[in-house]
Image (spheres, coloured by chain):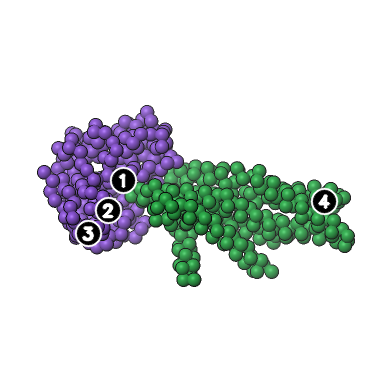
Amino acid sequence: MTDPLVFEDVVLDGPYGGVVSLTVPAHLTVSIVGNAASGVNRLAPFALGLTPLPGGRALVLGEDLHAMPRRAALAFRRRVGYVPAGDGLLQNLSLADNVALPLRFGTTMSPREIDGRLRIMLAQVRLDAVADLRPADADGEQRRRAALARALAFDPDLVIMDRPFDGIAGRAQIELIETARGGELAEGARRTVFVTGQFLPDRLRPRIEHRYRLVRGEFQTEP
Amino acid sequence: MARQVARGGALARFFLDILSASVSLPQAGRLVVWRVMLNQVWFSAIQAIPLVIVLSGIMSFLVISQAVRELGRLGATELIGRLMVIAIVRELGPLVTAVLIAGRSGTAIAAELATNKVMGEVHALEGIGIDPIHYLVLPRFVAAIVSVFGLLIVFDVVALVSGFVAASANGMSSTRYFDIVLRSLSLRDVWLTVAKGLVFGIVIGIVPSFFGLAVAGRPTEVPVASSQAVVFSLLMIFVCSALFVAITL
């Protein structure tokens, strides 16, 4: 079986530089933390082919998105759930419309089917009551949940979360990671989750099987 | 010079991307695009109608009232028809409408898309597999064309009516005014006006979006992108207008 995410001799440009390799095994949650200058913030965009790689390869579900034509790469990314840093929600759409966006642009589902699916997704991340709010009117936690629901729209096998815990409270952090993994009872059917950030809250450690710290261009295993 | 050529090439490629994106748009996405487009038409065209009426009315009134007086002295009031059709309907109508939309909506489009880019929304769209051209550019592109056409019709109708008021105020009968103007209007004039509306709409649909999405991500680039978008749009509109005259002479 192909590993969902592989970094092969990826060159990190930036103050510390370095060449890193890492394999993210299927059904596990892997985190990489590091300070802002370490290059940790570059890993998710590198993986998804959103930022040109200075060197090396990043394979997502066995495919190198950097080598794909633009349109093919766009279509392929729908197989991966992506929670961008900040949240990346469109400010002129409600939370519900933001969540529905991938379904509207990436499927041939009818509007009625999309509405049905949307209701389930909003309930899953407990956003039904505030679904009509614009991102600017929602709090940070609600925005992050909406971003996660949007990432899970296609029920992907791999979820990449870029700095997902910045500015949100402990309980919400656990909810986010558990929803991304597919729930506490999912066990062997869990999604593969790759999390990057500048810190990892202690309460999340038991839920993350492999934890690394990026220091001076090297991955160090965290206790 | 090389930079300008490269920019021209990038604009042409951007135009082709928009055309190909319009073909690959999924059906459910069309509803979203339609909604965004209607919002854009509301802002770019509907809200600009009073301004177009005022500009067109004053411009046409001034030109025709002066022309009736001066041409009347020479016994050449027949020429008012050609003046109205060529100067107002065919040349100034599309030009003023396009300049108005480029100045009013072009800045807004460029600033909005540049802000989308700075806020990471464009990056996020690409990350979740949505083509930013589908959601951000295509509706604005279609809306720009629709808006230029719509306002062009408003401009020309108001110009004709205002010209009539000016001619009447200077002693010309309504029958004679409309007779002269309608006799001067040929199918070629209509096609040229339509072609100009289409070309100017395409320019306004492409250039501001191109400059808006070209920012690298710094907030200070937003006003620069808006300014560049308007200047380049106006330049292209005037160049295209001159080319139309050169080709159709």
The residue lying at 28 percent from left, 40 percent from top is: A166
SS for dot 1: loop
Chain name for mark 1: A
Q: Residues within 10 Å of mark 3 (few under 14, many from 20)?
A: some
Work out how far the residue at label 3 is from the one at label 1, CA to CA, in angstroms.
21 Å
SS for dot 4: helix
Residue under label 1: A85
Mark 3 or 1, nearer chain start: 3
Would you say B206 lies left or right of A49 here?
right
Q: Color used for chain A?
A: purple
Residue B68: quadrant of the picture: bottom right
Residue under label 2: A42
Name the amino acid type tagged 4: Ala
Q: Residues within 10 Å of mark 1 (few under 14, many from 20)?
A: many
Asked whether residue A113 is in view, the answer is no
As rendered, which of B180 and B206 lies closer to the eye?
A: B206
Chain name for mark 2: A
Please give the label number shown on residue A17. 3
Please give the label number shown on residue B167. 4
Q: x%, y% of residue B185?
A: 75, 58
